[in-house]
Every structure is written in C-alpha cells, then in structure tokens.
C-alpha cells in the first residue's frame, strides 16, 4: 500500500480520476465505488476522501472531464459557412462520442447527487459551452431571431439529437426500417431547421 507522502494531493486526484474513468468505462456506473478506486491506485478510502468531498464530488469531476472531451470532439469538427452542415457535423460527433464512450457518456445523465445536493459549477459551465456552439450556428442561419428564441431552439434541437443517441446507445430504437441513427440525426436537424427558419 502506498504511503500518502508518495504522491502530492494533485497527483492523487489525477490518479483517482483516471482510475474512476477506467472502472466506469469497463464496468459501468454501478461498478464504481470509492473502495475500488482506492484499490486501483494503492491508497486507502480515507485518502480518497481527503482529496474529494465525497464520491459524488469525484463523479462530478469525472463528468466534467468527460464533457471537456465531448466538447473537444464536437468543436473540432470545425465551423463552416454552411451552418446546417456544421450542425449536422456536431450531431454526428455527439453520437460518435457517445457510441465510443457509452458508460462515461451515460454517467453524465445517470448520476444524481445524494440528498439532492447541487452540481459543481463547472458542470453547468461546460454544458453551457456545448449549447453555445449550437446557438452560434442557429443564429448565423437567421441573425434576426431573438436571443431567447435561438436559445430555446438550440435546447429543443439538441434534446432531439440526445434522444436519438440515448435510444441507440441503449438499443431501444425498435425500427423495422433500415435507417441508421446518424441518418436519423441528419434528418432531425434538417427538418427542425426547415421549420424553425420558415418565414
């Protein structure tokens, strides 16, 4: 068993977060516990709780890192002058990230803070930056739309993209037709924008 002096507080934090990500990726949310994380990094559970307030705090910090990676994947698609195409690329990147990291992606939505506690501010900020990407493209399609309208449109559109994604990831898209989730996402975005931008 490693001694507390073997690593700095920040190093233990990184070790614990990396271990938690590995456990979730391999075993899902239900496989995660402070004891497993501590065992994976060679420290005691007590050491984990010297670095994190509790398991909820640790999980929220894992989610913050996942959102950072998700933002990087989505934003790296690159904005073009064809704003509908950019939104389609965002949708495909979102779906691809969830498909490649199903357990970590699901953890963002499955985790509920015990006792109704609040999320760390960083989570809200990261989610806001993701929506800002969508809002920027919708605004570019019709700059005359009011800010509140654009914000609501981005929420509605991405809720649809998220819905298709979560149904596909959980294998609940009971469809007889030979249509793929990426095709559905493209159609959703096209149809939504056609209606939203209509005179």
Image (cartoon, rainbow, N blue to C red):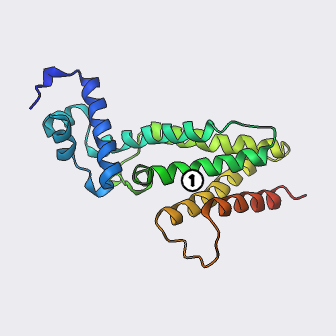
**Left or right: 107 as drawn, with respect to 99:** left
What is the residue that sits farthest to the front in this orientation?
178
Q: Local crowd at mark 1 within 10 Å, few (<14), some, or many (≥20)?
A: many
From the viewer's side, name the closer residue of 54 and 48.
Answer: 48
* Position of residue 104 measured from the top left corner of the image (x, y, whole percent): 41, 49
Residue beneath label 1, please? 95
Q: Is residue 14 left or right of residue 94?
A: left
Image quadrant where residue 116 sits: bottom left
Where is residue 76? Give x, y as percent. Answer: 62, 35
Residue 14: image quadrant is: top left
Tell how many labels. Answer: 1
Q: In the rendered image, which quarter contains the N terminus?
A: top left
| SS label for mark 1 | helix
Q: Nearer the viewer, residue 137 or 2?
A: 2
Q: Is residue 169 above or below residue 119?
A: below
- Which residue is nearer to you in this view: 121 or 159? 159
Q: Is residue 177 left or right of residue 71?
A: right
Residue 148 percent across, percent down from the top left? 72, 48
| Figure check: 184 above or below 122 | below
Tell me the residue at 20%/35% (across/down). 41
Q: Residue furthest right?
A: 199
> Quick one: quadrant of the C terminus?
bottom right
Picture quadrant of residue 42: top left
């Amino acid at each position: 068993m490693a001694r507390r002096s073997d690593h700095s507080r920040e190093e233990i934090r990184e070790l614990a977060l990396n271990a938690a990500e590995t456990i979730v990726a391999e075993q899902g949310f239900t496989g995660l516990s402070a004891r497993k994380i501590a065992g994976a990094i060679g420290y005691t559970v007590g050491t984990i709780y010297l670095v994190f307030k509790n398991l909820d705090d640790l999980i929220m910090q894992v989610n913050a890192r996942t959102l950072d990676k998700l933002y990087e994947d989505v934003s790296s698609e690159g904005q073009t002058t064809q704003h509908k195409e950019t939104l389609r690329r965002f949708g495909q990147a979102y779906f691809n990230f969830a498909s490649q990291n199903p357990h970590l992606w699901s953890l963002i939505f499955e985790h509920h803070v015990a006792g109704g506690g609040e999320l760390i501010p960083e989570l809200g900020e990261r989610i806001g930056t993701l929506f800002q990407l969508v809002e920027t493209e919708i605004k570019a399609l019709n700059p005359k739309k009011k800010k509140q309208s654009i914000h609501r449109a981005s929420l509605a559109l991405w809720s649809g993209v998220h819905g298709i994604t979560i149904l596909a990831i959980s294998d609940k898209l009971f469809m007889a037709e030979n249509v793929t989730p990426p095709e559905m996402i493209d159609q959703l975005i096209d149809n939504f924008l056609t209606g939203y931008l209509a005179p």
